[in-house]
Image: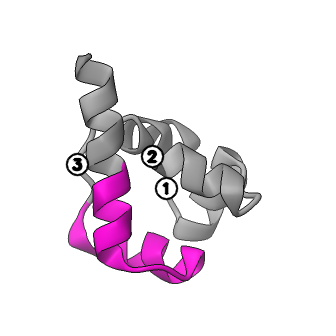
Amino acid sequence: MTLLEILKENRWTITEFAKRINVSRQYLYRVAEGKKKPSKELVEKMALLLQTSQEKVRKAIREAKNQTKN
C-alpha cells in the first residue's frame, strides 16, 4: 500500500495532510511518489497523524518508489 493509498483510506487529501504536517503539498506529493526522502521527524509526524507505525509509513513510501521504477 502506498502513502497516497493510506491517505485516501483515511480520507485525507494531500493538501490537508500537508498543512497538518507543515510541508508544502508539492513536497508531500514528491515524498508520496518516492521521489523525495522524508526526514525522520516528518515520518514521525505522518505516523502520529495517521495513527500508524513509522515503519508502515516508510514501507508505503518505498512501495511508491518501487512502482515508479516499473
Q: Amino acid at mark 1?
A: Val
Magenta span of residues: 39-60
Q: Are marks 1 and 3 in contact (CB under 8 Å)?
A: no
Q: Residue at x 63, y 59 (%)?
A: 17
Q: Which numbered disc flags the more N-terminal residue, 1 or 2?
A: 2
Q: Are marks 3 and 2 in contact (CB under 8 Å)?
A: no
* Colouring method of the image: one colour
The Cα–Cα distance between marks 1 and 2, rounded to whole angstroms, is 19 Å
The Cα–Cα distance between marks 1 and 3, rounded to whole angstroms, is 13 Å
Q: Residue at x 48, y 79 (%)?
A: 52
Q: Amino acid at mark 3?
A: Lys
In the rendered image, residue 46 lying in the magenta stretch gets the answer yes
Q: Secondary structure at mark 3?
A: loop
Q: Position of residue 61 (x, y in %)?
A: 33, 49
Q: Going by the picture, which residue comes out furthest to the right?
A: 11
Please indicate whether residue 3 sits to the left or right of residue 58 in the image. right
Q: Amino acid at mark 2?
A: Thr
Q: Position of residue 49 (x, y in %)?
A: 57, 78
Q: Going by the picture, which residue comes out furthest to the top?
A: 70
Q: In the picture, residue 38 is in which quadrant?
A: bottom left
Marking on residue 37: 3
Is residue 33 depicted above or below 69 in this figure? below
Q: Which residue is mark 2?
A: 2
Q: Residue at x 49, y 56 (%)?
A: 23
Front of the two marks 3 and 2: 2
Q: Which numbered disc flags the more N-terminal residue, 1 or 3?
A: 1
* Circle 2 crowding by C-alpha within 10 Å: few under 14, some 14–19, many from 20: many
Marking on residue 23: 1
Specify the quadrant that holds the C terminus: top left
Q: Residue at x 70, y 63 (%)?
A: 10
Front of the two marks 1 and 2: 2
